[in-house]
Image (tube, coloured by chain):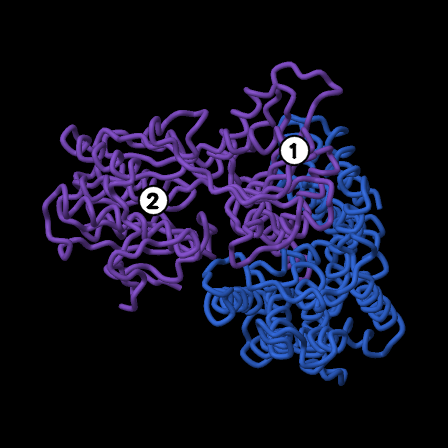
Amino acid sequence: MRTKRLKVLAVSVLLGLLASACAAPPPAAAPAQPAAPAADQTFTVGMVIVGPMNDKGWNEAHVEGTKYVMEKMPNVKFEYVDKVNPGDRPNVKGSQVADELIAKGAKVVIFNSDDFKDDALETAKKHPNIVVIHASGDYAWKEGKNYKNQPNLGNLMSKMEPGWMIAGCASALGSENGKIGTVGPLINEETRRYASAAYLGARYCWENYKKRDPKELQFKITWIGFWFNIPGVTLDPTKVADDFYNGGFDVVMSAIDTPEVAVQGKKAAEAGKAVKYHHYDYKGGCELAPDICLGVHYYNWGPGYLDIIKRAMEGTYTGTWTWAQADWKDLNNPDTSAFGYIKGKALGAENEKFLDQFIKGLGDGSIDLWKGPLNFQDGSVFLKDGEKATDQQIWYLPQLLEGMEGPSK
Amino acid sequence: MLYRVGAFVISLVLIGLVVVLSGASPITVIGRMLSGAFGTADQIGRVVATLSPLLLCAAGLVYTFNAGLYNLGVEGQITFGAIAATLVLRLLHPEGASASLAPPPLTIALAIVAGGIGGVLWGLLAGALHVYGRISEIFAGLGLNFAATGIAIYLIFGPWKRPGVASLSGTQPFDESLWLGTFGQTEATPVALILGLIALAITIVVMRNTYFGLRLRAVGKNLRASYVLGVPARRQLLSAFFICGLFAGVAGALQVVGVFHRLIPNISSNLGFLGLLVVMLVNFDPRWILPVAFFFSALNIGSLQLPLSLGLESSLSGVIQGLLVLFALIGRGLAQRYGRKLEH
């Protein structure tokens, strides 16, 4: 009896283990090698990546950035560990991965997610001679709320808020019924200001180009709880996207790292629904379902990383907080712009003209949407009439804005 | 013996085959995993930091296994212990406060005690469902695992969320004064290691040299017969759940104060399941737990090298662990079945 039970148990435990091994995505590509570095000159940079490095989203955009650096500086080599999160790698901490990368010779370690802020600080304290870059945080911002005086810790983030305004605008232009859904990750300052920027862009274009009443615009966000799906832990983004498409939302925006919104949009469109989606993070986002893609605002991490790594190699880098700007003269310039925007097929020629006007206005400052009167979601005043938001007010946005649906905290 | 050695050899061959199929050389994989576990002080520290809660869980599981119970709820007992420890830390050092209400060492000690109590509660709940509700302890345990994780997620997302943030990445880290001290700059904490070793030592003594251990084994071998012979079976079963919950809960508290310094959804890090494998592999004999748990901890930490240096999926180490245990069980089963026939 006991042996039989034991076998049943053992087999079920093992099936579970094997299933988890089989269910895991294919192994990440081996680290790319620089063209022809002289062995003694190789400069190693480690990257701790929160999700899968081939996610067609946030994480892949970072990997693209590292490829750019290696193209420009062939003696730089990157070592990556992806899927560093407690769902995919239980018992592995970001700081532990950084220790491993440093043991393998990394002189610079990049953490690519807001969730690594504690790990980045811990690593910087433990290894004062290593340059630690936390992509997206604010610990190195002297004027920020959370400044930590740690000279070898720096932050890099693209100033993507205008990118989100463009995304919101394109979504409003592409929507017929004014029902725009957003599949959001988790709630924090970054995601609140991004969602709010998207709403501001959508409202502006709905009102000024589409000449429709802002009251007809329904802008709803559903947060799944993390940057990507962790089965059993987060909401399932596939289901959230489906709920939007089935619930009459004709445009769904993705604000998460992975491509569920595009994939489910494609299925809904194939089933005859008149729906469109807007992608985020990764340049190739519209290739997932070109016919229904309105556009994609993507990160261009390359130039920012190149600058930091150059300075780290020279030994002149000290921790700074960089909020890298777009190049408004040439938004998609890979060498100068911190983010880019690619219009999708589903936008249409007429809307393209409107969107170009909007982008031009954002670039030359004639359109400034972070300007009062603006209220928070609970009705309290964010900006008085004519008041312009400071960088701190935008970065630390405490609530969503009035008119948006979805939780703020 | 022949069957066991044979099964072990077959498992090694199969592991080698899996490694080759995934596009690597077994020798390289073993080499990299070894150097990944013992190459630097940090790595050895991580192995020890993993070993400590694993020893606690494995020691606890010895009681339930010997009582004939398959305590799959050990994961939930770790998680609930971690929740209880976090609760005490938050009560004694409220968020944003500059100092604890009690001295930090006392706060940490109370958190560990609370972890033990939390684990006991969760263990006894599974035990009560089994003993009084006649529910299989496997299903009771698995159900309670989901419940404990659900509570942790609720707390992290709700009442205990970081200021302004609703993310599953965990609660705000505790003040550094509430972190367990470590060996140098590594992550290994002497307190956790000592607690793990004490739990194991007690378990070895109890199982070999006490009347309690003997009665527990009697209940495990034949519940009905031991009851008829006057062993208080229910009490023995509940005691086993009590002790296992206690050790697992302490392990959960140590994950909070020693490793993650906050509550995260997967605070158990699957160490409870790893403990199940360890105890099954040693045939419920606590004397062999230390080396096997050490080996599994090293495998767990070394497996980070698979993606790092070889571009392989690190869950391969799960396959290696699984195959070892599966074939150890098959070997034991064959030895029990056919070994006896030969004797006849």
Disc 1 marks a residue whose amino acid type is Ala
Q: Earlier in the sequence, mark 1 or mark 2?
A: 2
State the residue position of label 2: A254
> Is A15 located above or below residue A53 in the figure?
below
Where on the picture, by quarter, is residue B142? bottom right
Residue B294 is left or right of residue A130, and the answer is right
What colour is chain B? blue
> Is B104 located above or below residue A276 in the figure?
below
State the residue position of label 1: A312
Q: Residue at x 39, y 25 (%)?
A: A333
Q: Residue at x 70, y 83 (%)?
A: B235
Q: Would residue A255 be seen by someone viewing this image from the given angle?
A: yes
Query: Is the same chain shared between marks 1 and 2?
Result: yes
Residue B273 is left or right of residue A325, and the answer is right
Q: Residues within 10 Å of mark 2 (few under 14, many from 20)?
A: many
> Is B173 located above or below residue A270 in the figure?
below
What colour is chain A? purple
- The foreground one among A191 and A23 is A191
Q: x and y percent of residue B174 in the render?
A: 64, 66
Marks 1/2: CA distance?
35 Å
